[in-house]
Image: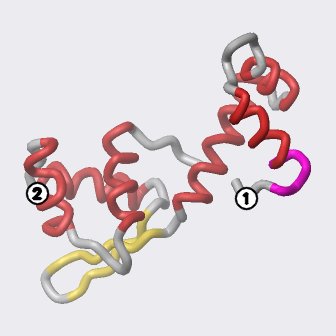
């Protein structure tokens, strides 16, 4: 899976919250005030996201319609697997050891993890 830049991930987060296809113009509305992005900037990011396989693009009339090709859950799972492999050599034990250093997890987090490991969690 291709890594996303922070800006690409921000755009995908916005797209994942919407139902159906999006347009560059529709996204500009979401990002012009908080990021100062113009149509060309958003269009460039959308093209990159299509190239990375995150979105599909379909020409409809005079505009491009972008649809999600990779769900948020699938992207997060892929990123987590990549992180585990790259940073911890694929070792789940190494990963949990890093999380388990004194004070790094709260009691509630430890309980949530126990429930998940016992097959009771939903995450």
Helix, strand or loop at mark 2: helix
- Magenta residues, dominant SS class: loop
Helix, strand or loop at mark 1: loop
Q: Position of residue 24 (x, y in %)?
A: 19, 65
Question: Is 119 included in the stretch rendered in magenta?
Answer: yes
Instruction: Quickly name the residue at label 1.
Output: 122
33 vs 89, left or right, is: left
Judge whether 64 appears above or below 72 on screen.
below
Q: Position of residue 104 (x, y in %)?
A: 67, 18
Say whether marks 2 and 1 touch (CB < 8 Å). no
Which label sits in the foreground, 2 or 1?
Answer: 1
74 vs 111, left or right, is: left
> Residue at the front extreme?
107
Q: Nearer the viewer, residue 95 or 86?
A: 95
Q: Residue at x 53, y 46 (%)?
A: 2
Q: CA distance from mark 2 to mark 1?
A: 39 Å
95 vs 41, left or right, is: right
Q: Quadrant of the C terminus?
A: bottom right
Instruction: Quickly name the residue at label 2.
Output: 39
Q: Residue at x 20, y 58 (%)?
A: 43
Q: Position of residue 8 (x, y in %)?
A: 35, 47
Which numbered disc, 2 or 1, marks the residue that appears first in the sequence?
2
Magenta region: which residues?
Answer: 116-120
């Amino acid at each position: 899976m291709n890594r996303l830049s922070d800006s690409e991930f921000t755009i995908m987060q916005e797209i994942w919250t919407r139902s159906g296809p999006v347009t560059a113009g529709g996204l500009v509305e979401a990002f012009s005030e908080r990021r100062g992005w113009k149509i060309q900037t958003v269009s460039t990011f959308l093209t990159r996201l299509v190239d990375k396989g995150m979105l599909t693009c379909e020409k409809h009339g005079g505009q491009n319609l972008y649809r999600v090709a990779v769900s948020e859950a699938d992207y997060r799972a892929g990123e987590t697997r990549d992180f585990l492999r790259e940073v911890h050599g694929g070792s789940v034990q190494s990963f949990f050891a890093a999380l388990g250093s004194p004070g790094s997890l709260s009691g509630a987090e430890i309980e949530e993890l126990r429930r998940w490991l016992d097959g009771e969690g939903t995450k």
